[in-house]
Image (tube, helix red, strand yellow):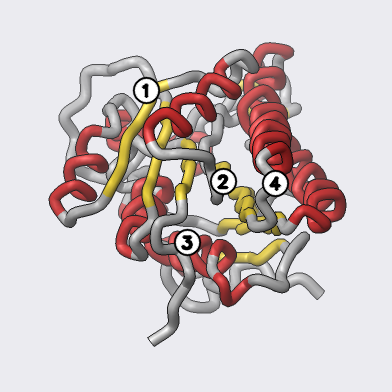
Amino acid sequence: MIDTGLKNKIVLITGVNNPYGIGAATASAFAAEGATVFVTYLRLPAEASTTNLPGEAFYHLQNTRTADEVITAIHERGGKIEAWEADLADPAVIPQLFDRVERAFGPVDILINNAAHCDPDTFIPQSRLGSNSRAVDEFPMGTITADKHDRHFAVNSRAVALMMAEYARRLIERGARWGRIINVSTDGASGFSSEISYGASKHALESYSRAAASELGKYGITVNIVSLGAVQTGWISPELEKEEASHIPLQRVGQPEDVADVIIFFASEQARWVTGQLLYVGGGHVMPL
């Protein structure tokens, strides 16, 4: 049996209120390893929807929830977890978040930057946008605006950079020599048609991650990236799932647990000499040369 070395480690995970999401699966996986978990999340505005079928409406509904369902499930298995709702687009929230973790459990050992903002946008003028493609039907696009750009970068890259800086400052000041940062990206980060600001902001996240790996290694901190293909977190309708699976060598879309297992590896003792790496977790959807 492999000992991941994660027992009693304190883990901070962002973006953990969707019970079908990657954050929830990751929190559960760390708790199963004996780690202590603190999660943060931000609810979307509620909309009138009672659908039980995966798709845009179902996904939105899951993201209007608190983290209570995730917390209850972990508590029922004897795990330790607490949560705080906060908007990571506000820089003032980030030191407050670390303060809350320290008051609840102690200093953060492992940081998982999973929270993301995604509002599909494009360079195509609004007057030329139709609803004749499945991508548009599933998640309506709009032409890029300053507000769309800024919200993506505030959450997906600036918040990640500030979270890493705050984590590193506290770890270094207390004289610790062991740390893990795992950041969640997308395999469309190099250029994401129809989600241009989301892709670009994740590309910036990847650059920050590599720079952090280079600078923080001497303090015992590893920094790695999981780059995701299509993962069923509630957003993929049955029709779209079949279409997506046809483009994936392993012939299925991902499940949150597929991603959580890789995050656990990066955090584990088994990955002690791995840093600055980007690992595609998408069933072979992307195979870089």
Please tell me the numbered disc located at residue 150.
none
Label 1 and label 2: CA atoms lie apart by: 21 Å
> Would you say the residues marked 4 and 3 are in contact, meaning their CB atoms lie under 8 Å apart?
no
CA–CA distance between discs 3 and 1? 22 Å
Q: Which residue is mark 2?
A: 111
Q: Earlier in the sequence, mark 4 or mark 3?
A: 4
Distance in Å between CA atoms under marks 2 and 3: 15 Å
Question: Residue at the location (73% across, 58% down)?
Answer: 220
Q: Earlier in the sequence, mark 1 or mark 2?
A: 1
- In the picture provided, is 20 more to the left or to the right than 138? left
Secondary structure, mark 3, is: helix
How crowded is the residue under tag 3: few (<14 C-alpha within 10 Å), some, or many (20+)?
A: many
Q: Nearer the viewer, residue 206 or 37?
A: 37
Q: Nearer the viewer, mark 2 or mark 3?
A: 2
Closer to the chain start, of discs 1 and 4, is 1
> To which quarter of the image does residue 235 belong?
top left
Q: What's under tag 2, amino acid-wise? A: Leu
> Disc 1 on helix, strand or loop?
loop
Q: Is residue 181 visible?
A: yes
Q: Is residue 178 above or below residue 116?
A: below
Image x and y of residue 225, in percent: 66, 56
At label 4, the amino acid type is: Gly
- At mark 4, the secondary structure is loop
Vertical order, 80 against 115 (above or below):
below
User: Which of pointers 2 and 3 lies earlier in the amino acid sequence?
Assistant: 2
Circle 1 sits on which residue? 43
Residue 175: mark = 4
Q: Is residue 263 left or right of residue 241?
A: right
